[in-house]
Amino acid sequence: IFLVYGAGMSVVMLGTTVVVAIGKQSMVRRLRQSARYVGRVSGAILVLAGAFIVWFWATEISAGASALGASSAFRIVENVSQTLLNFVADNTVLVAGFFAGLVGLAVWTVLGSGRAVRGPRRDEVGAGARGD
């Protein structure tokens, strides 16, 4: 599980690094605009994960492992986890291609907004100073 987590985080960090290195200002501006939503969504995910961990260990300590197996919440999480694990194991090329496509899309988006990367055209420089 740790290796899958590490690989997933590596893909995210690699993609972010490439996008920031290539996109500079344009992508940073877009990321800053979405930061308020990312913070709220990640906060909600952390709260849900924390609540599940507290519930899991409270049940384990108070009633034992047999109570966890009888819990519908535990079975749902276990089934979802197993389904995702099986999907990734059966479709590694598809999953890798998907994440490579995301990185490619991010790079293409940044390179496609060339004006933000290259700056304004020569005829636009100083236009505001002349009152045009």
Image (cartoon, rainbow, N blue to C red):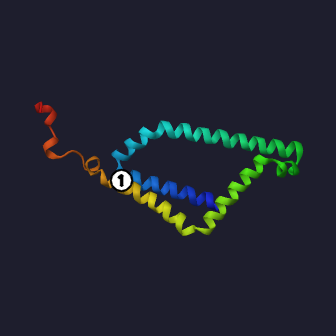
x%, y% of residue 41?
56, 40
x%, y% of residue 87?
62, 63
* Residue 45 position by quadrant: top right
Q: Residue at x 83, y 49 (%)?
A: 68
Q: Which residue is mark 1?
A: 109
When the figure is inspected, residue 130 is found, relative to residue 70, above or below; the finding is: above
Q: Residue at x 88, y 42 (%)?
A: 62
Is residue 49 visible to the viewer in this orientation of the structure? yes
Judging from the image, what secondary structure is the residue with disc 1 in? Answer: helix
Image quadrant where one finds the C terminus = top left
| Front-lying residue, 73 or 89 | 73
Q: Is residue 42 left or right of residue 17?
A: right
Q: Residue at x 66, y 61 (%)?
A: 85
x%, y% of residue 47?
65, 38
Is residue 1 visible to the viewer in this orientation of the structure? no
Q: Is residue 11 left or right of residue 45?
A: left
Q: Residue at x 70, y 59 (%)?
A: 82
Q: Residue furthest top?
A: 131
Q: Is residue 59 left or right of residue 37?
A: right
Amino acid on which the number 1 mark rests in the picture? Thr
